[in-house]
Amino acid sequence: MDGNYIIYKFVLASVILLISLVVAMYATLLERKIAGFFQDRLGPNRAGIYGIFQPLADGLKLFFKEEFMPGSADKFLYILGPSLTMMIALLTSAVIPWGDSLIFNGVEYSLQVADINVGVLYVFAILSIGVYGIMIGGWASNNKYALIGAVRAASQMISYELAMSMAIIAIVMMSGTLSLSEIVNQQHGFNWNIWYQPLGFVLFIVCAFAECNRAPFDLPECETELIGGYHTEYSSMKLGFYLFAEYINMFISSAMIATLYFGGYNFPFMDDLGLSHNALTIIGFFVFFLKISFFGFVFMWVRWTLPRFRYDQLMRLGWKNLLPLALVNVIITGFFIMLKHHS
Protein backbone atom coordinates (compact mmCIF):
# COMPACT_ATOMS: atom_id res chain seq x y z
CA MET A 1 0.00 0.00 0.00
CA ASP A 2 1.81 3.11 -1.22
CA GLY A 3 1.42 6.71 -0.13
CA ASN A 4 -0.48 7.77 -3.27
CA TYR A 5 -3.17 5.14 -2.57
CA ILE A 6 -3.62 6.38 1.00
CA ILE A 7 -3.78 10.01 -0.14
CA TYR A 8 -6.34 9.13 -2.83
CA LYS A 9 -8.58 7.26 -0.36
CA PHE A 10 -8.34 10.15 2.11
CA VAL A 11 -9.30 12.67 -0.58
CA LEU A 12 -12.16 10.46 -1.81
CA ALA A 13 -13.52 10.02 1.72
CA SER A 14 -13.28 13.79 2.31
CA VAL A 15 -15.11 14.55 -0.95
CA ILE A 16 -17.90 12.07 -0.12
CA LEU A 17 -18.19 13.59 3.37
CA LEU A 18 -18.43 17.09 1.88
CA ILE A 19 -21.01 15.97 -0.69
CA SER A 20 -23.09 14.28 2.02
CA LEU A 21 -23.10 17.44 4.15
CA VAL A 22 -23.93 19.75 1.23
CA VAL A 23 -26.71 17.44 0.01
CA ALA A 24 -28.17 17.25 3.53
CA MET A 25 -27.96 21.03 3.86
CA TYR A 26 -29.76 21.77 0.59
CA ALA A 27 -32.22 18.90 1.05
CA THR A 28 -33.75 21.03 3.82
CA LEU A 29 -34.36 23.84 1.31
CA LEU A 30 -35.69 21.46 -1.32
CA GLU A 31 -38.09 19.87 1.15
CA ARG A 32 -39.44 23.26 2.22
CA LYS A 33 -39.90 24.22 -1.44
CA ILE A 34 -41.72 20.95 -2.19
CA ALA A 35 -43.89 21.40 0.90
CA GLY A 36 -44.70 24.91 -0.26
CA PHE A 37 -45.68 23.62 -3.71
CA PHE A 38 -47.98 20.95 -2.23
CA GLN A 39 -49.55 23.50 0.11
CA ASP A 40 -49.91 26.24 -2.56
CA ARG A 41 -47.34 28.64 -1.11
CA LEU A 42 -43.85 29.81 -2.05
CA GLY A 43 -41.62 28.44 0.66
CA PRO A 44 -38.31 30.17 1.59
CA ASN A 45 -37.58 33.00 -0.85
CA ARG A 46 -35.87 35.78 1.14
CA ALA A 47 -32.24 34.70 1.56
CA GLY A 48 -30.82 34.96 -1.96
CA ILE A 49 -32.48 34.24 -5.28
CA TYR A 50 -35.31 31.72 -4.73
CA GLY A 51 -34.03 31.28 -1.16
CA ILE A 52 -30.75 29.67 -2.30
CA PHE A 53 -28.89 30.91 0.80
CA GLN A 54 -31.58 29.80 3.26
CA PRO A 55 -29.63 26.68 4.39
CA LEU A 56 -26.63 28.89 5.18
CA ALA A 57 -28.85 31.23 7.18
CA ASP A 58 -30.34 28.27 9.06
CA GLY A 59 -26.85 26.93 9.79
CA LEU A 60 -25.68 30.28 11.15
CA LYS A 61 -28.80 30.47 13.30
CA LEU A 62 -28.05 27.07 14.82
CA PHE A 63 -24.41 28.01 15.47
CA PHE A 64 -25.35 31.23 17.28
CA LYS A 65 -28.45 29.89 19.02
CA GLU A 66 -28.27 29.77 22.81
CA GLU A 67 -26.50 26.64 24.03
CA PHE A 68 -28.78 25.00 26.58
CA MET A 69 -28.23 21.91 28.70
CA PRO A 70 -30.68 20.75 31.40
CA GLY A 71 -29.16 20.87 34.86
CA SER A 72 -30.24 17.30 35.60
CA ALA A 73 -28.92 15.86 32.33
CA ASP A 74 -26.01 13.42 32.11
CA LYS A 75 -23.55 15.79 30.45
CA PHE A 76 -21.29 13.19 28.83
CA LEU A 77 -24.15 11.16 27.35
CA TYR A 78 -26.03 14.35 26.46
CA ILE A 79 -23.15 15.39 24.18
CA LEU A 80 -22.44 11.83 23.00
CA GLY A 81 -26.00 11.24 21.69
CA PRO A 82 -26.08 13.69 18.75
CA SER A 83 -22.37 13.17 18.03
CA LEU A 84 -22.86 9.41 17.72
CA THR A 85 -25.97 9.83 15.57
CA MET A 86 -24.12 12.12 13.16
CA MET A 87 -21.06 9.86 12.95
CA ILE A 88 -23.10 6.70 12.31
CA ALA A 89 -25.13 8.48 9.61
CA LEU A 90 -21.90 9.19 7.71
CA LEU A 91 -20.26 5.77 8.12
CA THR A 92 -22.46 3.85 5.66
CA SER A 93 -21.26 5.96 2.72
CA ALA A 94 -17.84 4.26 2.92
CA VAL A 95 -19.00 1.03 1.24
CA ILE A 96 -21.31 2.51 -1.39
CA PRO A 97 -19.84 2.34 -4.94
CA TRP A 98 -20.41 5.89 -6.21
CA GLY A 99 -19.09 5.05 -9.66
CA ASP A 100 -16.97 2.52 -11.53
CA SER A 101 -13.27 3.41 -11.62
CA LEU A 102 -11.07 6.04 -13.22
CA ILE A 103 -7.85 5.03 -15.01
CA PHE A 104 -4.93 7.48 -15.20
CA ASN A 105 -1.49 6.45 -16.50
CA GLY A 106 -2.43 2.80 -16.19
CA VAL A 107 -3.43 3.12 -12.52
CA GLU A 108 -7.04 2.33 -11.57
CA TYR A 109 -8.76 4.51 -8.97
CA SER A 110 -12.01 3.14 -7.57
CA LEU A 111 -14.85 5.50 -6.62
CA GLN A 112 -15.56 3.42 -3.53
CA VAL A 113 -13.82 4.23 -0.27
CA ALA A 114 -13.84 0.66 1.09
CA ASP A 115 -14.56 -2.21 -1.31
CA ILE A 116 -15.00 -4.86 1.38
CA ASN A 117 -16.38 -8.27 0.49
CA VAL A 118 -18.96 -8.09 3.31
CA GLY A 119 -20.37 -4.67 2.45
CA VAL A 120 -23.96 -5.79 3.08
CA LEU A 121 -23.03 -7.04 6.57
CA TYR A 122 -21.29 -3.72 7.22
CA VAL A 123 -24.52 -1.88 6.36
CA PHE A 124 -26.46 -4.20 8.71
CA ALA A 125 -23.96 -3.49 11.49
CA ILE A 126 -24.22 0.28 11.08
CA LEU A 127 -28.03 0.09 11.00
CA SER A 128 -28.05 -1.97 14.19
CA ILE A 129 -26.04 0.58 16.18
CA GLY A 130 -27.75 3.63 14.69
CA VAL A 131 -30.43 3.50 17.36
CA TYR A 132 -27.91 4.11 20.17
CA GLY A 133 -27.42 7.80 19.40
CA ILE A 134 -31.15 8.46 19.63
CA MET A 135 -31.61 6.28 22.71
CA ILE A 136 -28.68 7.88 24.53
CA GLY A 137 -29.94 11.39 23.72
CA GLY A 138 -33.44 10.66 24.99
CA TRP A 139 -32.15 9.02 28.17
CA ALA A 140 -29.51 11.67 28.95
CA SER A 141 -32.02 14.52 28.65
CA ASN A 142 -33.81 13.37 31.83
CA ASN A 143 -37.13 14.33 30.22
CA LYS A 144 -40.04 11.87 30.14
CA TYR A 145 -41.19 13.00 26.69
CA ALA A 146 -37.68 12.67 25.27
CA LEU A 147 -37.33 9.22 26.83
CA ILE A 148 -40.66 8.04 25.41
CA GLY A 149 -39.62 9.33 21.98
CA ALA A 150 -36.30 7.47 22.28
CA VAL A 151 -38.03 4.24 23.31
CA ARG A 152 -40.42 4.61 20.38
CA ALA A 153 -37.49 5.17 18.02
CA ALA A 154 -35.62 2.13 19.35
CA SER A 155 -38.58 -0.26 19.06
CA GLN A 156 -39.53 1.12 15.65
CA MET A 157 -36.03 0.90 14.16
CA ILE A 158 -35.36 -2.59 15.55
CA SER A 159 -38.74 -3.84 14.27
CA TYR A 160 -38.31 -2.51 10.73
CA GLU A 161 -34.65 -3.59 10.52
CA LEU A 162 -35.88 -7.19 10.45
CA ALA A 163 -38.02 -6.79 7.34
CA MET A 164 -35.35 -4.63 5.68
CA SER A 165 -32.70 -7.28 6.38
CA MET A 166 -34.89 -10.01 4.90
CA ALA A 167 -35.45 -7.90 1.78
CA ILE A 168 -31.68 -7.51 1.34
CA ILE A 169 -31.13 -11.25 1.98
CA ALA A 170 -33.20 -11.98 -1.13
CA ILE A 171 -30.78 -9.77 -3.12
CA VAL A 172 -27.80 -11.62 -1.59
CA MET A 173 -29.36 -14.97 -2.51
CA MET A 174 -29.74 -13.85 -6.13
CA SER A 175 -26.31 -12.30 -6.53
CA GLY A 176 -24.37 -14.83 -4.42
CA THR A 177 -22.20 -12.14 -2.85
CA LEU A 178 -22.15 -9.69 0.06
CA SER A 179 -20.06 -7.14 -1.85
CA LEU A 180 -22.00 -4.05 -2.91
CA SER A 181 -19.64 -3.40 -5.82
CA GLU A 182 -20.23 -6.93 -7.13
CA ILE A 183 -24.00 -6.53 -6.73
CA VAL A 184 -23.81 -3.36 -8.84
CA ASN A 185 -21.58 -5.02 -11.46
CA GLN A 186 -24.13 -7.82 -11.88
CA GLN A 187 -26.74 -5.18 -12.79
CA HIS A 188 -24.68 -3.97 -15.77
CA GLY A 189 -26.66 -2.06 -18.36
CA PHE A 190 -30.37 -2.49 -17.72
CA ASN A 191 -30.22 -5.83 -15.86
CA TRP A 192 -31.46 -4.20 -12.65
CA ASN A 193 -32.62 -6.15 -9.60
CA ILE A 194 -35.94 -4.28 -9.53
CA TRP A 195 -37.14 -6.56 -12.35
CA TYR A 196 -36.51 -9.65 -10.18
CA GLN A 197 -37.29 -8.23 -6.73
CA PRO A 198 -40.26 -5.82 -7.02
CA LEU A 199 -41.71 -6.99 -3.69
CA GLY A 200 -38.32 -6.71 -2.02
CA PHE A 201 -37.99 -3.14 -3.30
CA VAL A 202 -41.38 -2.14 -1.87
CA LEU A 203 -40.46 -3.72 1.48
CA PHE A 204 -37.06 -2.02 1.52
CA ILE A 205 -38.31 1.48 0.74
CA VAL A 206 -41.12 1.27 3.33
CA CYS A 207 -38.62 0.12 5.95
CA ALA A 208 -36.26 2.92 4.90
CA PHE A 209 -38.98 5.45 5.75
CA ALA A 210 -39.27 3.90 9.22
CA GLU A 211 -35.49 3.69 9.73
CA CYS A 212 -35.12 7.40 8.89
CA ASN A 213 -38.04 8.34 11.18
CA ARG A 214 -39.70 10.06 8.24
CA ALA A 215 -43.44 10.66 7.97
CA PRO A 216 -45.71 8.75 8.05
CA PHE A 217 -43.35 6.88 10.44
CA ASP A 218 -42.17 9.90 12.45
CA LEU A 219 -43.72 8.77 15.76
CA PRO A 220 -40.45 9.33 17.71
CA GLU A 221 -40.85 13.05 16.89
CA CYS A 222 -44.65 13.21 17.08
CA GLU A 223 -45.18 16.83 18.15
CA THR A 224 -48.87 16.31 18.98
CA GLU A 225 -47.88 13.88 21.78
CA LEU A 226 -44.18 14.20 22.57
CA ILE A 227 -43.29 17.80 21.58
CA GLY A 228 -39.99 17.23 19.74
CA GLY A 229 -39.54 13.65 20.91
CA TYR A 230 -36.03 12.47 21.71
CA HIS A 231 -34.41 15.86 20.88
CA THR A 232 -36.86 18.01 22.91
CA GLU A 233 -34.12 19.20 25.29
CA TYR A 234 -31.53 19.93 22.59
CA SER A 235 -30.61 23.29 21.08
CA SER A 236 -27.91 24.91 18.96
CA MET A 237 -25.69 22.56 16.92
CA LYS A 238 -26.54 19.51 19.05
CA LEU A 239 -30.07 19.82 17.70
CA GLY A 240 -28.53 20.56 14.31
CA PHE A 241 -26.65 17.25 14.41
CA TYR A 242 -29.88 15.31 14.96
CA LEU A 243 -31.65 17.20 12.16
CA PHE A 244 -28.68 16.86 9.82
CA ALA A 245 -28.39 13.14 10.54
CA GLU A 246 -31.99 12.63 9.41
CA TYR A 247 -31.28 14.13 6.00
CA ILE A 248 -27.96 12.30 5.66
CA ASN A 249 -29.76 9.04 6.48
CA MET A 250 -32.32 9.88 3.81
CA PHE A 251 -29.52 10.54 1.30
CA ILE A 252 -27.71 7.28 2.15
CA SER A 253 -30.99 5.30 2.10
CA SER A 254 -31.71 6.65 -1.39
CA ALA A 255 -28.20 5.65 -2.44
CA MET A 256 -28.74 2.12 -1.06
CA ILE A 257 -32.06 1.79 -2.92
CA ALA A 258 -30.37 2.86 -6.17
CA THR A 259 -27.43 0.51 -5.50
CA LEU A 260 -29.40 -2.62 -4.61
CA TYR A 261 -32.38 -2.35 -6.97
CA PHE A 262 -31.69 0.17 -9.74
CA GLY A 263 -28.22 -0.71 -10.95
CA GLY A 264 -26.24 1.92 -9.05
CA TYR A 265 -24.15 3.79 -11.62
CA ASN A 266 -25.24 1.50 -14.48
CA PHE A 267 -27.66 2.83 -17.07
CA PRO A 268 -29.35 1.45 -20.23
CA PHE A 269 -27.36 1.14 -23.48
CA MET A 270 -24.14 2.24 -21.77
CA ASP A 271 -22.09 -0.14 -23.93
CA ASP A 272 -23.61 1.21 -27.16
CA LEU A 273 -22.36 4.78 -26.70
CA GLY A 274 -18.81 4.00 -27.79
CA LEU A 275 -17.32 6.14 -25.02
CA SER A 276 -14.09 5.61 -23.11
CA HIS A 277 -14.03 3.91 -19.72
CA ASN A 278 -13.41 7.18 -17.87
CA ALA A 279 -16.23 8.96 -19.73
CA LEU A 280 -18.67 6.17 -18.86
CA THR A 281 -17.55 6.35 -15.23
CA ILE A 282 -18.21 10.10 -15.05
CA ILE A 283 -21.63 9.74 -16.73
CA GLY A 284 -22.46 6.82 -14.43
CA PHE A 285 -21.59 8.95 -11.40
CA PHE A 286 -24.10 11.61 -12.44
CA VAL A 287 -26.70 8.97 -13.36
CA PHE A 288 -26.30 7.51 -9.87
CA PHE A 289 -26.91 10.92 -8.29
CA LEU A 290 -29.93 11.41 -10.53
CA LYS A 291 -31.39 8.16 -9.14
CA ILE A 292 -30.58 9.26 -5.59
CA SER A 293 -32.27 12.62 -6.21
CA PHE A 294 -35.40 10.90 -7.46
CA PHE A 295 -35.72 8.71 -4.36
CA GLY A 296 -34.95 11.72 -2.17
CA PHE A 297 -37.90 13.44 -3.81
CA VAL A 298 -40.05 10.36 -3.09
CA PHE A 299 -39.13 10.63 0.61
CA MET A 300 -40.29 14.25 0.63
CA TRP A 301 -43.35 13.58 -1.52
CA VAL A 302 -44.60 10.91 0.88
CA ARG A 303 -43.96 13.11 3.92
CA TRP A 304 -46.22 15.88 2.66
CA THR A 305 -48.89 13.54 1.26
CA LEU A 306 -49.69 10.79 3.78
CA PRO A 307 -50.95 11.27 7.35
CA ARG A 308 -49.06 9.90 10.35
CA PHE A 309 -49.79 6.37 11.59
CA ARG A 310 -50.88 5.61 15.12
CA TYR A 311 -48.12 3.83 17.00
CA ASP A 312 -50.02 0.55 17.27
CA GLN A 313 -50.65 0.67 13.51
CA LEU A 314 -46.96 1.30 12.88
CA MET A 315 -45.85 -1.70 14.94
CA ARG A 316 -48.58 -3.93 13.50
CA LEU A 317 -47.47 -3.05 9.97
CA GLY A 318 -43.86 -3.97 10.75
CA TRP A 319 -44.46 -7.26 12.57
CA LYS A 320 -47.68 -8.62 11.04
CA ASN A 321 -47.43 -7.40 7.46
CA LEU A 322 -43.92 -6.48 6.32
CA LEU A 323 -41.99 -9.25 8.11
CA PRO A 324 -44.24 -12.10 6.84
CA LEU A 325 -44.11 -10.60 3.33
CA ALA A 326 -40.31 -10.42 3.54
CA LEU A 327 -40.16 -14.10 4.57
CA VAL A 328 -42.47 -15.04 1.69
CA ASN A 329 -40.23 -13.07 -0.68
CA VAL A 330 -37.15 -14.98 0.53
CA ILE A 331 -38.96 -18.32 0.05
CA ILE A 332 -40.12 -17.40 -3.46
CA THR A 333 -36.61 -16.21 -4.36
CA GLY A 334 -35.12 -19.48 -3.09
CA PHE A 335 -37.68 -21.47 -5.09
CA PHE A 336 -36.81 -19.72 -8.36
CA ILE A 337 -33.08 -20.07 -7.69
CA MET A 338 -33.59 -23.82 -7.15
CA LEU A 339 -35.55 -24.10 -10.41
CA LYS A 340 -32.80 -22.22 -12.26
CA HIS A 341 -30.07 -24.53 -10.94
CA HIS A 342 -32.05 -27.68 -11.78
CA SER A 343 -33.17 -26.62 -15.25
Image: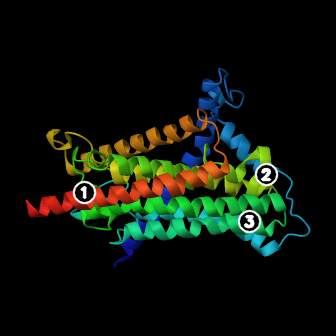
Q: Earlier in the sequence, mark 1 or mark 2?
A: 1
- On-image quarter of the C terminus: bottom left
Residue 137 is tagged as 3
Which circle, 1 or 2, is nearer the viewer? 2
Q: Are marks 3 and 1 in contact (CB under 8 Å)?
A: no
Q: Residue at x 46, y 48 (%)?
A: 205
* Type of the residue with mark 3: Gly
- Kindly identify which residue carries mark 2: 226
Q: Helix, strand, or loop for circle 2?
A: helix
Picture coordinates of residue 84 (x, y %)?
A: 64, 68
Q: For marks 3 and 2, give the CA distance.
A: 15 Å
Q: Relative to residue 229, is residue 101 drawn left or right?
A: left
Q: Helix, strand, or loop for circle 3?
A: helix
Q: Residue at x 66, y 51 (%)?
A: 311
Q: Is residue 3 visible?
A: yes
Q: Earlier in the sequence, mark 3 or mark 1?
A: 3
Mark 3 nearby-residue class (10 Å; few <14, some 14–19, many ≥20): many
Q: Relative to residue 7, is residue 279 drawn left or right?
A: left
Which circle, 3 or 1, is nearer the viewer? 3
Q: Helix, strand, or loop for circle 1?
A: helix
Q: Is residue 20 visible?
A: no
* Type of the residue with mark 2: Leu
Q: Residue at x 59, y 38 (%)?
A: 303
Mark 2 nearby-residue class (10 Å; few <14, some 14–19, many ≥20): some
Q: Nearer the viewer, residue 259 or 206?
A: 206
Q: Residue at x 66, y 30 (%)?
A: 51
Q: Nearer the viewer, residue 109 or 333?
A: 333
- Kindly identify which residue carries mark 1: 185
Q: Could you say which quadrant of the image residue 340 lies in?
A: bottom left
Picture coordinates of residue 275 (x, y %)?
A: 19, 43
Q: For marks 3 and 1, give the CA distance.
A: 40 Å
